[in-house]
């Protein structure tokens, strides 16, 4: 992943040194379990841990040089470790196959990455909640099809985003549990040359569950579910980012990304303040979703295993988690510093001459004895006059002058249907559902 969209803690998880350290722990824990069963000498495991306890530097370049000859990364690693440890290292990897190491390592890396993503989501949820509470009763217009519909509050918009990301967090917790599996079952997964207890021992040491049937590789439906979950979270990021982008349009300008001192919006137009962060988030979300299809296609491997999934996962494992980590952090910053303009929200609410209250009048007329079809026709003919005047006309005044309306409703009853607070009487209930 390019540095521009990477954060150090997530990058470290995918660096070769971390991968090789996980490989060593898998091999050493397995050797411990083999020694307990008398398959290898106890001195073999002791020699491995004795060397490890010296905190050796992982010579990535040396391992890469060996792989250039062997054309096999796990063999290159084992060869390098043997050169460091000595004769006892020959007992490593007894009864194991490369996928035991590679798949179990990937499970560890993905769980490490997920822990960072969960922390990211906690920070985002906290930021959204703070701003939602701040604007719980800030009136704004709700839109459907991009067109004024009925009043909502800005806090309610953010409460919806909070609920969506809370669901995303729950899915991510489940995805972490599904991906956190260990396979130490040997060639074609039969345990012919290694006891299942070795797998259980390694799994316990690494905080993983055992894979019930590994067929030499961990089934990739687990990985498909994991990356699909990341894709859904990315879509939630884009949804909120798109809302901010729309709200920042000049004609709307109800909210705006923070514009820092010295920031420039355009090389040509000095007046520009563009929603560059949320536009960037839209693009990053597309990238994360783009990794979902390859993960789904990895499910269909040949027989007990092939490695068509391997090259895919070397890309999507780092790129999807690094990109999502960056995107969640960026969105948290956007929400935390979001400039919100209640006066502009009120101005936009008022600009269409009260059209946003048309449903209340429609319902009142039906309750007063006029059929729904006739009630709709009466309200709509007045509403269209307001629409065509671009809000210069007042729906309330037109209704007061409409004989069909006045036969059923007094002027005071009409005015009551234009009470803005009426729309917010259940906001507390919504917030209780979302935030508890």
Image (spheres, rainbow, N blue to C red):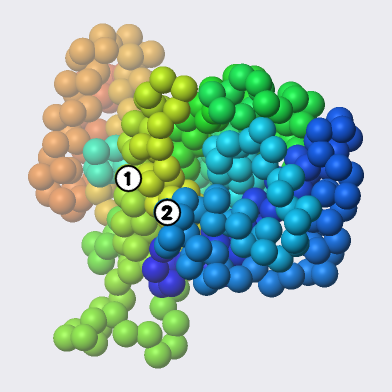
Residue 57 image point, x, y percent: 69, 72
Element assignment for label 1: helix
The residue shown at (69%, 53%) is: 24
In this figure, which residue is indicated by the disc labeled 1? Answer: 290
The residue shown at (39%, 68%) is: 2
Q: In which quarter of the view is residue 268 placed? A: bottom left
In this figure, which residue is indicated by the disc labeled 2? Answer: 71
Residue 300 vertical position relative to residue 369 in the rendered view, above or below:
below
Instruction: Give the mark nearest the N terminus, 1 or 2.
Output: 2
Q: Does residue 45 appear to the left or right of 316 in the view shown?
A: right
Label 2, residues with CA under 10 Å away: few <14, some 14-19, many ≥20: few
Q: In which quarter of the view is residue 277 placed? A: bottom left
Label 1, residues with CA under 10 Å away: few <14, some 14-19, many ≥20: some
Residue 156 disc label? none
Q: Is residue 99 visible?
A: yes
**Count of picture labels:** 2
Element assignment for label 2: loop
Task: Identify the residue at the far front of this view.
Answer: 87
The residue shown at (34%, 63%) is: 280
In the image, 70 versus 175, the foreground residue is 70
Q: Is residue 333 visible?
A: no
Residue 92 image point, x, y percent: 71, 46
């Amino acid at each position: 992943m390019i540095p521009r969209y990477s954060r150090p803690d997530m990058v470290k998880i995918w660096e070769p040194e971390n991968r090789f350290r996980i490989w060593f722990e898998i091999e050493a824990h397995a050797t411990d379990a083999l020694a307990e069963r008398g398959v290898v000498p106890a001195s073999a495991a002791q020699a491995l841990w004795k060397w490890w306890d010296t905190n050796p530097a992982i010579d990535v370049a040396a391992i890469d040089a060996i792989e250039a000859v062997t054309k096999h990364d796990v063999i290159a690693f084992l060869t390098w470790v043997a050169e460091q440890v000595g004769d006892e290292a020959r007992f490593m990897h007894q009864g194991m196959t490369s996928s035991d190491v590679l798949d179990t390592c990937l499970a560890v890396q993905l769980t490490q990455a997920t822990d960072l993503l969960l922390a990211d989501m906690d920070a985002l949820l906290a930021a959204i909640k703070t701003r939602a509470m701040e604007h719980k009763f800030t009136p704004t217009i709700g839109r459907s099809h991009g067109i004024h519909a009925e009043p909502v509050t800005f806090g309610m918009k953010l409460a919806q985003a909070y609920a969506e990301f809370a669901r995303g967090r729950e899915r991510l917790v489940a995805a972490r549990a599904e991906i956190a599996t260990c396979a130490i079952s040997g060639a074609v997964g039969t345990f012919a040359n290694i006891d299942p207890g070795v797998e259980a021992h390694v799994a316990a040491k690494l905080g993983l569950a055992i894979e019930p049937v590994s067929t030499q590789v961990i089934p990739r439906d687990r990985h498909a579910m994991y990356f699909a979950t990341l894709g859904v979270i990315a879509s939630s990021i884009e949804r909120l980012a798109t809302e901010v982008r729309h709200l920042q349009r000049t004609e709307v300008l109800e909210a705006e990304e923070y514009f820092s001192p010295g920031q420039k919006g355009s090389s040509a137009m000095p007046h520009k303040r563009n929603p560059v962060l949320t536009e960037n988030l839209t693009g990053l979300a597309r990238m994360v979703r783009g990794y979902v299809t390859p993960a789904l296609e990895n499910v269909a491997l040949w027989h007990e295993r092939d490695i068509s999934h391997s090259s895919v996962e070397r890309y999507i494992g780092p790129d999807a988690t690094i990109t999502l980590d960056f995107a969640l952090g960026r969105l948290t910053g956007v929400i935390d510093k979001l400039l919100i303009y209640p006066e502009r929200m009120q101005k936009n609410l008022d600009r269409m001459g009260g059209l946003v209250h048309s449903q209340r009048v429609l319902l009142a007329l039906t309750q007063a004895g006029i059929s729904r079809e006739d009630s709709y026709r009466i309200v709509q003919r007045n509403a269209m006059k307001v629409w065509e005047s671009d809000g210069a006309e007042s729906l309330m005044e037109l209704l007061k002058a409409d004989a069909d309306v006045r036969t059923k409703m007094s002027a005071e009853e009409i005015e009551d249907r234009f009470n803005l607070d009426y729309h917010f009487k259940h906001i507390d209930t919504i917030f209780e559902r979302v935030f508890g």
